[in-house]
Image (spheres, rainbow, N blue to C red):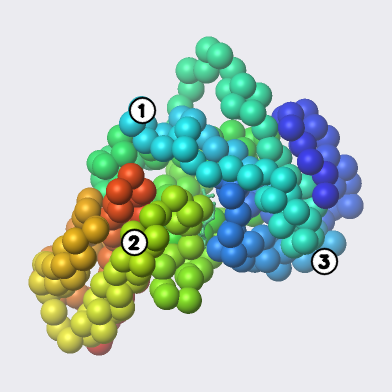
Amino acid sequence: MQVCRSKAAIRSTIAAFRASGAPVVLVPTMGFLHEGHLSLMRLGRERAGADGRVVASIFVNPTQFGPNEDFDSYPRDEARDFDLLRAEGVDAVFAPEATEVYSPNAQTIVETTELAKTLIGKLRPGHFRGVATVVTKLFNITRPDAAVFGQKDYQQLAVIRTMVRDLDMGIEIIGAPIKREADGLAMSSRNVRLTPQDRAAAPILARALDEAEAMAPTGITASRLRSHVRATLEAEPRARVQSVDIRDATTLETISGPLARPAVILLAVSFGKVFLIDNRVVHPAQEET
Ligand code: AMP
């Protein structure tokens, strides 16, 4: 596996890969890899094929963190990450410093104007501008045929699909299902920062989503379903509920009344200083066409 620290190095590595004409698939991450990330690498390999190349990136992007967020305490272990990527057969990793990625007088941003200011965008102003801008830069640096992102970050996936469509980027975006721990907790690099008590309480997110999934086909309204999920989460004294939303699963637009189409339930919950998100697409008994 080639380890590239500079844009020039990853560009020339990928140029050599491309000489064979086989596809290049990018899997962007912030590192501290877990089984969820590795499932993305496997999907990347499936898309690339035996002759194609899978390129991972590891970059904790400062511009997507707010001033009071966890950029400094975000977990990092590059040596372990490289071992895991090697074991998955990843062909190259781009792991730059922030000074390599951003020029000091950078002034260009990419923003999905509507999607960036709703849901998580309200809780984390500027977050999706940082994400869209860095993903655009990673796409421009690596020029992949396809890129893989997890449905764990449901709104992020919607932001990226929208950006690729709106700016004619011509990159296939592949969404990967959420990987969970045995007790249902969605895997996240941040889970290691939970205290033992909070770790024991955190599967409440998955339980609330299980309940909602079971209730969705009963003809329940979106607002009652949302209240039910919120009450389940609030019954856990260690959980600080940041937001519970039910949106159209495709457009992320608000919905009201009985569910008529697939809906996504989006949760953001803090335990101490650790911010966790989770989501589930749920279905009514009969879907309107
Ligand atoms: P991150 O390192 O948290 O930025 O995540 C990098 C990529 O892995 C993103 O596309 C995430 O959506 C995805 N990802 C993170 N956690 C999971 C998970 N539990 N299951 C599937 N994909 C995930």
Above or below residue 72? Residue 145 is below
Q: Residue 256 at what x, y percent from top left?
A: 13, 66
Name the foreground residue: 208 vs 254. Answer: 208
- Look at the numbered disc 2 and give the secondary structure of its residue: helix
Q: Which residue is pictured at 74% across the width and 32% down the height? A: 5
Q: Which residue is pictured at 59% across the width and 50% down the height? A: 32
Above or below residue 280? Residue 54 is above
> Dot 3 surroundings within 10 Å: few (below 14), some, or many (20 or more)?
few
Where residue 122 sits, quadrant-wise, is top left
Mark in the foreground, 1 or 3: 1
Where residue 157 sits, quadrant-wise, is bottom left
Q: Residue 104 at what x, y percent from top left?
A: 56, 14
First reached walking from the N terminus: tag 2 or tag 1: 1
Q: Disc 2 vs disc 3: Cβ atoms closer than 8 Å? A: no
Q: What residue type is labelled 3?
A: Ala
Mark in the foreground, 2 or 3: 2
The residue tagged 3 is 50
Q: Which residue is pictured at 37% across the width and 35% down the height? A: 69
- Look at the numbered disc 3 and give the secondary structure of its residue: loop
Name the foreground residue: 39 vs 14. Answer: 39
Q: Disc 2 vs disc 1: Cβ atoms closer than 8 Å? A: no
The residue tagged 1 is 67
Above or below residue 227? Residue 241 is above
Label at residue 197: 2
Q: Residue 126 at what x, y percent from top left?
A: 35, 33
- Look at the numbered disc 1 and give the secondary structure of its residue: loop
**Left or right for 121, reference 229:** right
Name the foreground residue: 214 vs 222. Answer: 214
Q: Which amino acid does label 2 sit on?
A: Gln
**Left or right for 68, reference 229:** right
Mark in the foreground, 2 or 1: 2
